[in-house]
Amino acid sequence: MRDRPEVLADTLAILTSLNADAEVLAATLLDALVDVEALAAQAQVEVPERMHVLLEGQRAASRVWALHRSHGGGRNPEGMRRLLLALVRDLRVVPIVLARQLSRMRAAWRLPAEEQRALARMTRDIHAPLANRLGIWQLKWELEDLAFRVLQAEDYLRIAQSLDDNRAGRERYIEAVRAQLRDAVAGQGIDADVAGRPKHIYSIWKKMQRKALPIEELYDLRALRVLVDDIPTCYAVLGLVHALWVPIPSEFDDYIARPKPNGYRSLHTAVIGPEGKTVEVQIRTREMHAQSELGVAAHWRYKEGGSAGGAAMDKRIAWMRKLLEQAAEAAGEGEAAPLQDIDSELIEDRVYALTPKGEVIDLPQGGTVLDFAYAVHSMVGHRCRGAKVDGRIVPLTQVLKTGQRVEILTGKEAAPRRDWLQPSAGFLASSRSRDKVRAWFNKLDRAQNLKEGRELLERDLRRMGLLSADLAPVLARFNAQTEDDLLVLVALGDVGPNQVGRALLELEKAAQEPEPPLPPQLPARPVPPAAVGAGAVTVQGVDNLLAQVARCCQPLPGEAIVGYLTRARGVSVHRPQCAAFLRLAGKEPARVLPVEWGARRSGQDVAIRIEAVDRKWLLKDITTLVAQVGVHAVGLHTDPLRGGSGRVRVRLQARVSDYEQLGLLLARLESLPGVESARRA
């Protein structure tokens, strides 16, 4: 939307009053007049990166405004504000859009009534609260008043007329009280500026609503502001004010000792002044006043000067990016926590995705489409069967980015899956989502949980070759009294089946007894490409012997292993349960050697067998997932299964770093649509 010349001129004037630099003014002007990046591309001229970011931010803001208009406005204004701040990379864009909106509101009387109301709703929902949270009071008050005048014209006029009726008398009274306080302060040798403070109509109306009082009973319609040089002088002036007039204890607020959440600092007190009339007095330093008027904009040169803003400014910017909850909509109304109390939360990153209707859903960094479904509603998550992101079907493990539009595909019945609770499977990044899934399974009876837990655990142990292992020795590690208790913990997601498998492997490794001494040491020689990397396996404390992973069982770093001294190929490394090793060891037990994984581990090839429904894009989905997990695919081969059932067997040769990465890969493969099983071959 191109603005009229007078609106653009007013925008630039507002930005100048906020101490905007030349780069910001230029970006504002260029965005309003031309598509500078298209012209630059045509002329083959490169736009400076800082200017590009400012222009990109203004376009992102325009998209948020369009979204607000097209989806009914105020259903989720907090989400809209968060989405805006997430999309904007340079925070100097925010004062630009606030100044532009204020200029448009000042000129809104030229627009048709419905357009005026749409503009005012956006101002009320997004711009005024952002100005409040940035602490730019100079813009906040006027934005609120202009939106209030359009949206609640009768209330606005009633309060305005009441103020006009009493204006002359109130101004004479304020001038007399101001002179009295100015003389008293000067008499104490204090350098101070004392001025009357106008009360804005919207804030008057809000206080009338909040306190259920008529306008005549509000304390702060008559108000003074005192500016001094330092904080000790603020408290000295406070004592002087309380000595001059009788204070009203319930109306005292110390926002210097306890700043408002957006950093606002000042002393507020109300007293019974001359003629028995109440007067509000605000006392602050001149630096605090500049901050209260300009907020973050007072420091928006901080990027240019290096440390001009300092650590405190960085913290302020981090806070503004995070934002506060909707309950803190108007800073300081009610009990607000000091800024330092939220230091631990400042670095938290969020993702803001959109529903098909334009609602903004707030997720933690790394949130998936399944997290999105649970954030919409618990039953949407329970019934989730698939999802589309920006119109494209994606797996439930798809990680979302800010601004993406997500459509959840649901079934008729709620049927969450147990493997959603396994962190290694990558379905859920939000602990809140996992709690909802866990709560669902907690409602099932114990017999069902036992059955499901046994199936989950057996599937993982089968992959590891531990299906017949005794679970009793590892029960205590998981605080389980019986095997059934452990199975229930697995079913509810409190214990991962891979954790049980790892515990069993560690137990086997620890239980290995010292073997017969090694025959005369083999001479060291270079390890061929097919062998394990140097230092990857240690044989009785020596890490430079020829060693190679046995092709029959292909053990991986992290698994229990044992060595067998061959006649010509050095030490062959097997899994203890390997049938080939057990046969060889039975014939010549003296050749069995204790081995362990060394400090240096290279990738190992492993064969994986996948059985799945033969569908379009199956192989593409498999190879994409393998790449996402960070595994190198060495080979891929498919064969149809017998019987013409429309099923295929996929043989995947992959190079993994260790057993844990293999477990993650197998779990993620089984989560693909149509995949019935994925296990080590």
Image (cartoon, rainbow, N blue to C red):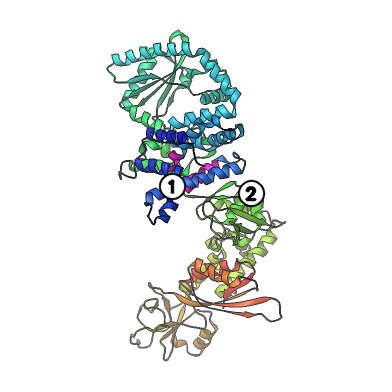
Give whichever of 273, 417 is nearer the camera: 273
Residue 671 lies, with reference to residue 156, above or below; the image says below
Q: Which stretch is magenta?
A: 78-96
Residue 303 x/y as whole percent: 34, 45
Residue 99 x/y as whole percent: 45, 36
Task: Give the amino acid type for the residue marked by disc 1 in the picture.
Answer: Leu
Q: Is residue 94 magenta?
A: yes
Q: Residue at x 51, y 56 (%)?
A: 366
Q: Is residue 468 magenta?
A: no
Q: Secondary structure at mark 2?
A: loop
Q: CA distance from mark 1 to mark 2?
A: 36 Å
Figure quadrant of the C terminus: bottom right
Task: Give the amino acid type for the residue marked by disc 2 in the picture.
Answer: His
* Disc 1 target residue: 55
Instruction: Between label 1 and label 2, give the one nearer the viewer.
Output: 1
- Asked if one can make out residue 91 in the rendered structure from this viewpoint, the answer is no
* Disc 2 target residue: 377
Q: Residue at x 60, y 70 (%)?
A: 617
Residue 206 x/y as whole percent: 55, 26
Q: Residues within 10 Å of mark 1 (few under 14, many from 20)?
A: many
Toward the top, the furthest residue is 275
